[in-house]
Image (cartoon, rainbow, N blue to C red):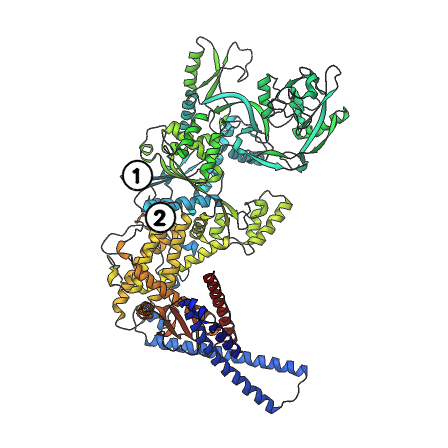
Amino acid sequence: MHANLRLALNLFVRRGNNIIRSTSPFAISKLSSFSKAVTMVESETKSSEMEKKDSTEAGLASEPKQLTPEELERKKKKEEKAKEKELKKLKAAQKAEAAKLQAQQSSNAPKTGKKKNLKREGLEDNPEDYVDPETPLGEKKRISRQMAKAYNPSAVENSWYAWWEMSNFSVADSSSSKPPFVIVLPPPNVTGALHIGHALTAAIQDTIIRWRRMSGYNALWVPGMDHAGIATQVVVEKKLKKEMNKTRHDFSRQEFVDEVWKWKNKYGGTILKQLRRLGASLDWSRECFTMDEQRSKAVTEAFVRLYEEGLIYREIRLVNWDTILKTAISDIEVLHDDVFGRELRQIPGYKDPVEFGVLTSFAYPLEGDLGEIVVATTRVETMLGDTAIAVHPDDKRYKHLHGKFAIHPFNGRKLPIICDAILVDMHFGTGAVKITPAHDPNDFEVGKRHNLEFINIFTDDGKINRNGGSEFAGMLRFEARVALTEALKKKGLYRGFKDNPMRLGICSRSQDVVEPLIKPQWYVNCKGIAKEALDVVMNDDNRKIEIIPKQYAAEWKRWLENILDWCISRQLWWGHQIPAWYVTLKDDEQKEIGSYNGRWVVARNEKEAQEEAQQLFPGKQFQLSQDPDVLDTWFSSGLFPLTVLGWPDDTKDLRTFYPTSVLETGHDILFFWVARMVMMGIKLGGDVPFRKVYLHPMIRDAHGRKMSKSLGNVIDPLDVITGITLEELHKKLEESNLDPTELEKAKEGQVKDFPNGIPECGADALRFALVSYTSQSDKINLDIQRVVGYRQWCNKLWNAIRFAMGKLGDDYTPPVDVVPDVIPFSCQWILSVLNKAISKTVLSLDSYEFSDAATAIYSWWQFQLCDVFIEVIKPYFSSKDSEFVSEKKFAQDTLWVCLDTGLRLLHPFMPYITEELWQRLPSRSDCARKESIMICDYPSTVEVWNNDTVESEMDLVEAVVKSLRSIRSLLPANERHERRSGFVLCRSNDATGIIQRRQLEISTLASLSSITVLGENDVSPAGCAVSVVNEVVSVYLELRGSINAEAEREKLKIKMEEIQKGNLMSLTIMHH
């Protein structure tokens, strides 16, 4: 077969001078290398074939007897056993030889250091030296005398945070001359526990604030909690029901609010404690709560000022009503589910599934025996509140009915037939539309246009009220739907149904189907302030806020241009009670709150309200009643950047830190919260609340699915930090409120995604993984294995410092400075690439490209410091050569500079491990050491470290090493770690010069026993495998008889075919 290969090569080379002339020098060099390699393969193959031939001939000469199949099988097994036995013997001999060699090296080694002497004398290290002593809470962590052999997240992350907090490293000073940099933490709900979205927010914001703090800014990160009106009230109501079997209505309002405060003080704020576990360096001295005294005062002041400016008003309108929570909710708290046809859904509060996606037709009898008019609806139950039937004025079918009446079949009410060209499409359905002004947004507008009666037929808990008639009163609305359909059938008015695609409004909190109800509520007029909020983002001449990523600016524009007035009333007891009082005069016939218009007074307190009422109704006796409703939670949250700094008081914090620097949050609350903060900030604070808005992606599971308990894919960040077994994950599911079917499905999901549970990863690895993921558009597909990978990387960092501590020694003192001109090549290189890593990291952080920043740091530590520099300087420490004495000192100094700088560079991303490792590094003698790495200076580039020439040379060195390692990886497993001779063939003077100068680095990194630099005219070394590095450099690695001739021949054949194909293609292009 080798003859065929030689023939193929010769034919290829002899294809004609035209091809060869069009072939690049790189391709010719490849052909030359392949030719030499084929010669070497032929030589190996001939030798191998001669051996086989001799063996065969010897076998034929002996003419052994024919064996039976059974005998052949026994012989085969016997040979395999003998071979296995020989292999074991060989391994044992190798092991013994290695031990013997190690013992000889130990006995010959100089006796430096008491600990090494103890080891040689057979004494074991004291295990306690590797364990951190117990640290009293709040004191600086007491670290072990010796570094543990491996990284342990829980050991490393213990005690540091309490010390940081007690030392006030995160406290900002409003009197500081440093430039301020301020972030307000999006206030988590008081009911909340840490979820993966909070972890992402904390990881990003802490990275920003630690970087800015280390970069010389007066950095302030303000923590706070939101009182979460609906969510908290629901939690406490469930608690009271479970423990006392009582509802909130069994208490007075004040008694219930007192119960909520008790719950808040006992259980609330868990999430803030959990944020400490993540290492979030918040300024806890400024912690606040949206219902504390200062924030409550601010909310009242904001309401009064907006009312006085005419931006808050009270009006009867349709609201989105939740019959489970018994409160209005805002438009943006309503989710819209598409229903594509008839389907049954389970709705809270109903035993049986409810039918949706159906259009039901029925007839209204006409007055005066004029027949009937057929209408259709998806909500049959609302016909009890119908007050008209609308037709198009141009619809000839109904011209004769203009001004006539239909008769309601259940209460006899006369329904006028009205003409409305705005609402009615004469070509849809029957062209006649039932009008329910009190329960449909479109019908509400028709009712106002035609001055129709507004009849509410529902109670606040979703039952038919007395306006719906005695036959249906007390029924739940969807039960009434079924009853009405049957009643229409009995009366002969039912005309059938058909599938009807529709959108169903669902409350995002309770999953109840939202019911439009007519209610008197307080509203914020948003038109004017929304225009201002739009301009500060979109107006080139007045841009004050930058939204990152940029694509969300278009959404900002679309939403603010179509904004509706904001309903801020909520029918709850927990929250900021609306500072408005209703005046009931002694002579009023109707005493119910809201019975008369023009009776509301808005004030900061009841005393002010009393004074204002006296001015409005002088000399009259009256009684004041405060509006029982509370404000929408987003109202107080919208004021948060102002109120956390002391507004409405003129505080030093407010003057120093407002506007804040950046708001970092999820894009899902861009309008819930961000837009409202901008509107409120401009109107009440006189300026935008922040200069930048960074919107992070939403987290999904590794498969891109939304995280859901029912799928079993919800990831608790604390489980990732501390680790959790599969059984414990199952147990957490069992404690939730999933039904048996969902529970089983969720468990199956956990088994698939976490078959062995989640290993302990630590906060640092989780943080780094989350920040690294931020480049993924608007979604993050979180794979726990990536977090595990970063936990393993932490072990690499740990070992790098362990190596350094061993090489620096106990008496080492770091240099004041490192002069690049006099240090070894590898030291110059690592400082130059460190400079690039610093530059890339700072530029990426400044442009909010957090993933790029993380990648720059990771790449430098992993691929340049650990994989190259630490390996390449080892000869300086192990060799007895006197010429390495100065190199060793330079290597020590450069190593210390790299570790000190690299840890400071990494600290904002991984605060715990960097603090622990930095504290172990020796400190310089020329200046006082900072107490903590978190208050050290962030690295900046050093001009004299830049060296493009050195980097270019190292690029070639790394390429040569990569090629040699590639050849080595193809060797049998038991031969891969043997040191072998290497050869580098150079076809240019520049390459020759570089390789000759860098023989030590190449030998060290490629584990060579020797290296020989060859010129283009030198004979290729025999018995070697070859690899082409580039057009001017090829490498050879000695094989020592381990070559697989057949495999090498096949690889060369494939490479020859690739080059042939490429050259034929280039020739074709030239001809064209």
State the residue in front, 133 or 763: 763
Q: Position of residue 789 (x, y in %)?
A: 46, 57
Residue ID for mark 2: 843
Q: Position of residue 425 (x, y in %)?
A: 63, 26
Q: Position of residue 945 (x, y in %)?
A: 28, 57
Residue 744 in sight: yes
Choose top left, top right, bottom left or bottom right for residue 347. top right
How crowded is the residue under tag 2: few (<14 C-alpha within 10 Å), some, or many (20+)?
some
User: Going by the picture, which residue comes out furthest to the front?
Assistant: 1071
Q: Are marks 1 and 2 in contact (CB under 8 Å)?
A: no
User: Going by the picture, which residue comes out furthest to the bottom?
Assistant: 61
Helix, strand or loop under label 1: loop
Q: Residue at x 52, y 28 (%)?
A: 572
Judge whether 668 appears above or below 726 on screen.
above
- Give the mark, 1 or 2, whose residue is nearer the N terminus: 1
Choose top left, top right, bottom left or bottom right for residue 683. top left
**Circle 1: residue type:** Asp
State the residue in front, 585 or 505: 505
User: Going by the picture, which residue comes out furthest to the left?
Assistant: 926
Task: Say which quadrant the N terminus sits in.
Answer: bottom right
**Circle 2: residue type:** Leu
Residue 921 in sight: no
Alpha-carbon span between mark 1 and mark 2: 27 Å
Helix, strand or loop under label 2: helix
Q: Position of residue 743 (x, y in %)?
A: 61, 47
Residue ID for mark 1: 173
User: Going by the picture, which residue comes out furthest to the top?
Assistant: 619
How many numbered discs? Answer: 2
Describe residue 972's horizontal placement relative to residue 353 as left or right. left
